[in-house]
Every structure is written in structure tokens, then in C-alpha cells.
Image: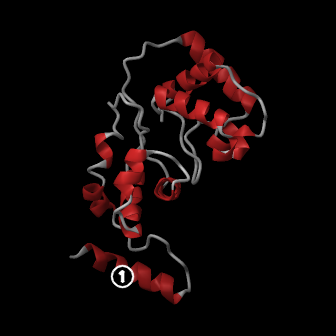
Amino acid sequence: MHPMRKKWPTLAAAVALGINVPGALADAPAGEKKAELCVLCHRVDNSHGAPLLDGLAAGYLLKQFEWFKSGKRFGPAMQVNLSPLSSEDLQDIADYFSSHPATRAATKMTSDRQAQELGSTMASNLGCAGCHGGDYRGAEDVPRLAGQLRNYLAFQMSKLQRDSSLHPSMSSSGQLLSQPAIEALATYFASLEP
């Protein structure tokens, strides 16, 4: 049976009830084929700093895709790769990644217990769990930190400190972190189970 036919009863019920179902026609299996280019960089064994997308909420991923396409988030490779994709393509890709369990980044970094403990204390003091969840696994529109690539986390935290317009709520404390503090936070988050 064609995948679209399987969705018709659900879609028909939603339409009959007047429910707006964004992504109702999305197709995670189709997203696998469309995401082939994505997984060249966004994979557990990457060494160039691309975040892991598996297990992130589809809504969060779609927002990031839109920001890259519009230029609100800068990333030349992302802008080039996303520009030819339709809204349906993006929904399929987001559904594909969100349908997978979260995985931990493979790293050659040695365990640094002192940095992990410092990072844990700092995360608690900064209230990171208030948005990212007590287990730092994120939520609908908040990304997961647990198990992400350490270098990616450190880079993004530094970037957010330099430009408060990227994420005003993270910058509202006015507290600038030193690079060693950022590295400790990144080490802690990366050490957690996703």
C-alpha cells in the first residue's frame, strides 16, 4: 500500500474535526533518502563539529532549517544544502531524524572527571536544566545537550555569548563565561547519556 494511503484516515479525521496537522503528510521513510546528504556530516563519528540530529524534536529541527534557509543562522554549507528543498522535504527530513533514538557522539576525548564535575556544578548554577530539562535531553523546541559532540557544544556556547541576538534568553543573565568554563560545560554535557 502506498504510504500516503495509510495516512488518509488520520488526515481525514483531523480535517473533519478542524484540526490543523502540520506535517500530516510528512513521510519519515522518504526523509531517509532525502537526508542522505545530511548524514555525511551529522553522524556520531564526525570530527568536524556538526551536531547529532537523531532524537531531536521535529519542530526544533524545522525551525533550525528555516533559520538556515533565511540566513538568520549562518552556515554556508547548510544554506546551500537546504535551499533547493521544499517544505515537505524539510518536514520529511525532520521526521526522519526525530524518529530515531538519540545517540551519543563518538569521541576520542579522554574522560576528564574534574572538568565534568565543574561543568555539572556550573550547569546547576546557571539553571541550564530550566530549559534543557533535568537530564539535558531537551524538549520540543529546545535542543538536547546530553551526548552531543563536545566541540560543537563549546563552539555554540562561545558563539551565543558573542551574539546575544541568536538566543536572547541564554544571554539575559549577562554573565560571561571564560573559555575554560565553556569547555567544562561542554565536557559535562557531552559525557551524559542522550
Q: Residue furthest bottom?
A: 16
Label 1: few (<14), some (14–19) or many (≥20) C-alpha neighbours in 10 Å: few
x and y percent of residue 190 in the render?
50, 27
Location of residue 51 by image quarter: top left
x and y percent of residue 119 in the render?
63, 21
137 vs 47, left or right, is: right
Work out which quarter of the rendered image holds the N terminus and state it. bottom left
Residue drawn at x 38%, y 60% as measured from the top left? 83
Indicate the secondary structure of the residue bearing disc 1. Answer: helix
**Residue placed under numbered mark 1 in the picture:** 8
- Please say if 111 is above or below 39: above
* Amino acid at pointer 1: Trp
Location of residue 160 by image quarter: top right
Q: Observer-nearest residue: 73 or 167?
A: 73
> Is any part of residue 54 visible from this angle?
no
x and y percent of residue 26 in the render?
38, 68
125 vs 114, left or right, is: right
x and y percent of residue 32 in the render?
28, 55
Q: How many marks?
A: 1
